[in-house]
Image: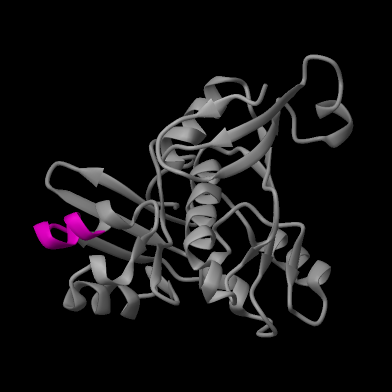
């Protein structure tokens, strides 16, 4: 029987206790299939508590397919939630032919291939070589949200204290429809590259950080 992490509809993943496929297949290491039917952050925390250190997504995330945008933004958010816990992810991303499109997603655990590019494996290797945890994150403070974004090299830091932005970010953390976010707020967040739009759906790019991996001023 496939365990279900209940909540709101998602997808099926497989999980193991180790990132190495050979080790993950050993007795006691493979945790099996999970029906993810829960908000991504909570599902990731429960998988971590169950011992998962490696998760495999069922199919590529295709951000060029607007008909499947709802699934794509939820999957991207879930990969971010797994990345925030240093859980490795076996997945693929279809970005289309732009060789630099991956940089918008480069804070997520690197995929095995970036589909649609001239050399999917080489693009994924470039991503992997540039990857480190906490590359684009947000955190909650008393009355504010802070975002730190290094996806494009330099540190870009945003401290947000306006209530309407807090409400928007809360709605966006697991993906949202474009009509659910006030247009002035959405325009600001998209203008800074913190929100990406796929058809009628939106993805909040930063993932939540709960513990710095290094001194905050380094990150």
Instruction: Note whether residue 69 is visible.
Output: yes
Residue sitting at x 44%, y 77%: 199
Residue 137, placed above or below residue 95? above
Residue sitting at x 48%, y 37%: 37
Q: Which residues are magenta?
A: 160-168
Q: Position of residue 183 (x, y in %)?
A: 20, 77
* Residue most extreme to the right: 22
Horizontal side of residue 156 vs 112, given as left or right: left
* Residue most extreme to the top: 28
Q: Position of residue 25 (x, y in %)?
A: 85, 27
Per the picture, the main secondary structure of the magenta-coloured stretch is helix
Horizontal side of residue 207 vs 120, given as left or right: left
Residue 76, placed above or below residue 25? below
Query: To which quarter of the image does residue 179 belong?
Result: bottom left
Say whether residue 185 is magenta: no
Return the residue nearer the eye: 17 or 153: 17
Quarter of the image with the N terminus in it = top right
Residue sitting at x 41%, y 41%: 8
Q: Position of residue 200 (x, y in %)?
A: 39, 74
């Amino acid at each position: 029987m496939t365990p279900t992490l209940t909540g709101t509809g998602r997808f099926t993943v497989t999980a193991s206790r180790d990132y190495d496929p050979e080790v993950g297949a050993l007795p006691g290491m493979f945790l099996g299939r999970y029906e993810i039917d829960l908000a991504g952050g909570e599902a990731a925390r429960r998988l971590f508590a169950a011992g998962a250190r490696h998760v495999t997504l069922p199919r590529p995330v295709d951000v060029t397919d607007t008909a499947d945008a709802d699934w794509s933004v939820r999957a991207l958010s879930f990969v971010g939630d797994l990345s925030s816990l240093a859980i490795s992810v076996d997945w693929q991303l279809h970005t289309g032919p732009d060789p630099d499109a991956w940089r918008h997603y480069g804070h997520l655990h690197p995929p095995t291939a970036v589909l649609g590019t001239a050399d999917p494996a080489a693009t994924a290797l470039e991503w992997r070589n540039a990857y480190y945890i906490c590359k684009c994150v947000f955190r909650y403070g008393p009355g504010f949200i802070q975002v730190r974004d290094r996806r494009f090299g330099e540190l870009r830091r945003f401290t947000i204290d306006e209530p309407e932005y807090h409400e928007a970010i809360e709605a966006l953390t697991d993906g949202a429809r474009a009509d659910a976010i006030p247009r002035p707020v959405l325009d600001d967040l998209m203008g800074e590259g913190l929100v990406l739009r796929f058809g009628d759906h939106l993805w909040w790019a930063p993932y939540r950080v709960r513990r710095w991996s290094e001194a905050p001023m380094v990150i």
